[in-house]
Amino acid sequence: MRLLSAFIALVPLLFLGPPAAARGQLVIDLGRGPVVLQIPDSYDGSTPAPLILNLHGYGSNGFQQEAYWQLLPEVEERGILYMYPSGTVDPQGSG
């Protein structure tokens, strides 16, 4: 539910456009840990852009998910906003 709250809080930023200093990455932390939004260099905020939310399965994390799919070059080339967050971990340390 917190990831959904973070996404809802992020939506207005997608239409306003990020400040120039935030190009590349925007880190969002609403209390569940940092979530990185990859912003392509071509994004200017004047035109809506698609967002890919790449979610990992149990026992993995966002960085492993991105390492497997390697979408960063493709989303940059196509002008797509991209997030690959890590989920919360259980008491045994698995996410």
Image: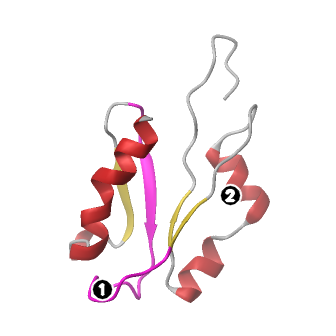
Q: Which residues are magenta?
A: 32-50
Give the crowd class for mark 1: few <14, some 14-19, many >=20 residues within 10 Å: some
Identity, as a three-letter code, of the amino acid under mark 2: Glu
**First in sequence: mark 1 vs mark 2:** 1
Residue at 64%, 50% in the rendered image: 55
Q: Position of residue 69 (x, y in %)?
A: 75, 63
Q: Quadrant of residue 4?
A: top left
> Which of these two is toward me, 10 or 43?
10
The residue indicated by pointer 2 is: 66
Write the residue at 31% across / 38% down: 30
Q: Amino acid at mark 1?
A: Asp
At mark 1, the secondary structure is loop
Q: Position of residue 65 (x, y in %)?
A: 71, 52
- The residue where tag 1 is placed is 44
> Residues at badges 1 and 2 in contact (C-beta under 8 Å)?
no
Label 2 crowd (10 A; few <14 / some 14-19 / many >=20):
some
The spot of residue 61 in percent (x, y) is 66, 40
Q: CA distance from mark 1 to mark 2?
A: 24 Å
Q: How is the image coloured?
A: secondary structure
Q: How many marks?
A: 2
Dominant secondary structure, magenta: loop
Tell me the tag on residue 5.
none
Q: Residue at x 57, y 54 (%)?
A: 84
The N terminus, quarter of image: top left
**Would residue 86 be counted in the magenta stretch?**
no
Residue drawn at x 51%, y 78% as measured from the top left: 80
Query: SS class of the residue under badge 2?
Result: helix
Q: Would you say residue 41 sits in the magenta stretch?
A: yes
Quadrant of the snapshot with the C terminus = top right
Q: Is 55 situated left or right of 7 in this image? A: right
Q: Percent position (x, y) of residue 50?
A: 49, 77
